Amino acid sequence: MEMIYESALLTIEKVRNFRYMISDVFMPNKDLLKKNSNLKGALKGKRCFILGNAPSLNEQDLSLLKDEFVITVNQIARNKQFKDIKTDIHFWADPGFFNEENTNDEFIEVMKGVVSEDNCPMVFYPLSAKRFVENHELDKYLNIHYFSPLYSFHGKYKRNIDFCKGIPGFYTVVEYGITLAIYMGASEIYIMGCDCTGIVNTLKSFQDEVTDEYAYEISEEEKKRMKKMQEANLLENHFYSWYKTLQHYRYLYEYCYARNIKLVNCTKGGVLRDLPREKYEDVIMRK
């Protein structure tokens, strides 16, 4: 019965993707994605590191990444070690971030904060956030690139990742970083700060407990903004997104393995068990 159920789900995903192929052809503002063409194969044969924002990141010396290709996400600019990273690419993906009702001046400054005097990374936003970017004039401060989450990602997904077109949609921003690394031709992809315990923060929020279990300190105003954003969705939706997040990590590992790409979890601790693990320090020493 379980095999029949999984087969039925896979069939549904494939039917959806056939429909999305049509949407891909007629996508509004699709020309903006052409800017990503120069990234294809840019990391061929090289390695990269993708940093999440879980508390475990504070237990690792990020200055060791100063000569590595690094992809960061979300509010990591608040992290005390951020200035040591010299990130190359930064991602924003959660649609909740681009809801004007959840936006304030502090949050916009954090978005701008990925740029420093000696570093100006490429910053990726979903194509659907274009109006948000323009309304807050982020395109005047940041090296903006867009991506378009479109397809359903599943265990039999065989399409090539192409950031000049629609790509698979995910429930956590780190997985978009992984897909970009694949598109760029990286042969080794290492993720860090991916404890996968964020559902704990959500549960506390629903119990009127404000938590700051991230790789950085946040203000009281930001805690209120994040609590409001979390409570905008039903709790069952949060659980579904975490189920899909863990499932997609497994599928991404299988997708990479089939293409001879090494995908490794260098997070210190955490609950993600579907990727092989290596110690961060050991990986750094191998260069």
Image (cartoon, rainbow, N blue to C red):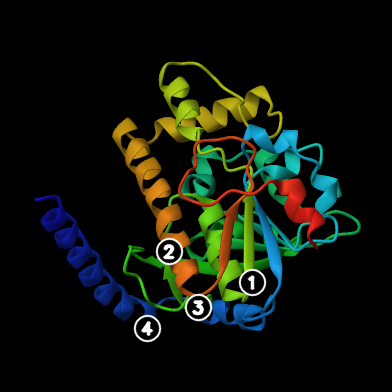
The residue at 63%/71% (across/down) is 187
C-alpha separation, residue under disc 3 versus residue under disc 4: 13 Å
Q: Are marks 3 and 2 in contact (CB under 8 Å)?
A: no
Q: In which quarter of the image is residue 250?
A: bottom left
Give the mark count: 4
For disc 2, the neighbor class at 10 Å (few under 14, some 14 to 19, many from 20) is some
Q: Which amino acid is tagged 1?
A: Ala
Q: Tag 2 or tag 1, which sits nearer the N-term?
A: 1
Q: What residue does disc 4 label?
A: 25
| Mark 1 / mark 4, whichever is N-terminal | 4
In this view, the residue in front, 44 or 101, is 44
Mark closer to the chain start, 3 or 4: 4
Can residue 162 be seen in this snapshot? yes
Q: Is mark 4 on a helix, strand or loop?
A: helix
- Give residue 186's mark: 1
Q: Label 1 vs label 4: CA separation?
A: 27 Å
Q: Badge 2 is on which residue?
A: 254
Q: Quadrant of the C terminus?
A: bottom right
Q: In this view, does 186 lie above or below 210?
A: below
Check the image and report above or below for 118 versus 259.
above
* Residue farthest along the top direction in this orientation: 208
Q: At label 3, which amino acid type do we have?
A: Asp
Secondary structure at numbered mark 3: loop
**Comparing labels 3 and 4, the label whose residue is closer to the camera:** 3
* Residue 85 seen in render: no
Mark 1 secondary-structure assignment: loop
Q: Quadrant of residue 71?
A: bottom right
Residue type at numbered disc 4 = Val
Residue with the mark numbered 3: 162
Picture coordinates of residue 131 (x, y %)? 54, 61
Image check: 80 left or right of 256?
right
Please give left or right for residue 248 compared with residue 71 in the image: left
